[in-house]
Image (spheres, rainbow, N blue to C red):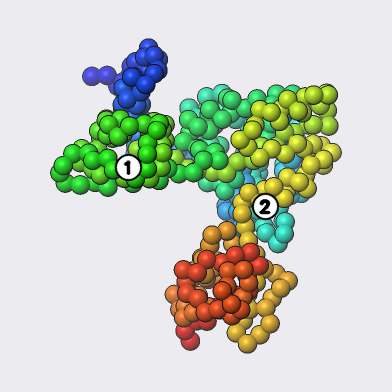
Amino acid sequence: MATIDEQIKELEEQIANTKYNKATEAHIGKLKAKIARLTAEDEKRRSSKGPTKGFYVKKAGDATVALVGFPSVGKSTLLNQLTGAKSEVGAYHFTTLDIVPGVLEYNHAKIQILDMPGLIKDASRGKGRGREVIAAARASDVVLLVMDIFNPKMDVLMKELYNAAIRLNQTKPDVVISGSSQGGVLVKPTVKLTKIDPETIKDMAVAYGHINATIVVRDDINVEQMLDVLSGNRVYIKCVVAINKVDLAKPGELEAALELYPDHTTVPISAATGYGIEELKQTLYETIEMIRIYLKPQGKEADLVEPLIVKKGNTVGDVCEVIHRDFKNNFRYAMVWGKSAKFPGQTVGLDHTVEDEDILTIIVKR
């Protein structure tokens, strides 16, 4: 019987030998679903043999940004500029052999910045400790891709992150798969599907191993997105691109580099001179989408000096969790002043969504 690796290789060869068009789309989708299932089985088998030694970084601050790039693009110098952390700097490959953390304090927020060892081709397959680096990147709030003005193309880097199930600047497809005891696979789209048909979705689900299930599709997805849904291990992370060493650029080089990233927020910088660093700090802060909440103890003035930093879209319940879990467990009600309030001092519950610079009083059971 063929091994999992041999089965995957055979399926990949079938895909390579199949000309992609509308008529073969469903067939290729089924083959990719089978590869995804076999890959998941292989990962499960590997993990059962014991955990792989990886990088351990203690979470700190209100959010985490991972510096990801090829070796020697200036990530360590950039970390030092952003945080004052001491990451070893050298003009040779693989200066950073471990993950070095630092903290950027900006607009009252504490943002953990991780200087990661450089990624190389086939990092997603484990080359150059790539899997361990990527595992740390998967846990971040923002991936900061650091590119060199002399080698600004990031096709290889993007492919390695994609192969490692990281989806940059994408939203998770709104597709729900619910298992059932009988009836086969039923696909229920709530929107018009223009990139994939229901039959292909059904065939891919069956190829992945779903026998009886209802699949509700609320987004106009394509084959790759359906594959992501079936795999279930994808992470969706925001991304910012920093093009480094622009102080050394020749005329026209920066303009050409910027044209490579039309779908990403891109900031030209020089980690060596400090050029663009303040703009990069502001961009990271805005990308993370953090907001400031001022706490007002009952019967006292609000603390307008040290705000509590939470994520955009957070609720009063989330704020309670940040303060202390007892606040949520003993919660009675809250009062809010600011953008999210219909009127000053509005009484709200745990599910009320707060906005930037709201003033909040939380009343707990005594």
User: In the image, is residue 186 above or below residue 289?
Assistant: above
Q: CA distance from mark 2 to mark 1?
A: 37 Å
Q: Which residue is mark 2?
A: 285
2 vs 1, front mark: 1
| Res 257 label | none
User: Considering only vertical position in the picture, is 244 above or below 13?
Assistant: below
Q: Are marks 2 and 1 in contact (CB under 8 Å)?
A: no
Which residue corresponds to the image point at 30% horizontal and 30% vertical from the top-left?
200
Q: Nearer the viewer, residue 147 or 337?
A: 337
Furthest-top residue in view? 17
Q: The residue under label 1 is which amino acid type?
A: Pro
Identify the image quadrant of residue 312: bottom right
Q: Position of residue 342 (x, y in %)?
A: 56, 74
Q: Residue at x 79, y 36 (%)?
A: 270
Position of 310 relative to 12 (above/below): below
Q: Observer-nearest residue: 255 or 141?
A: 255
For disc 1, the marked residue is 189
Q: Amino acid at mark 2?
A: Tyr
Image position, residue 223 (x, y; %): 39, 31
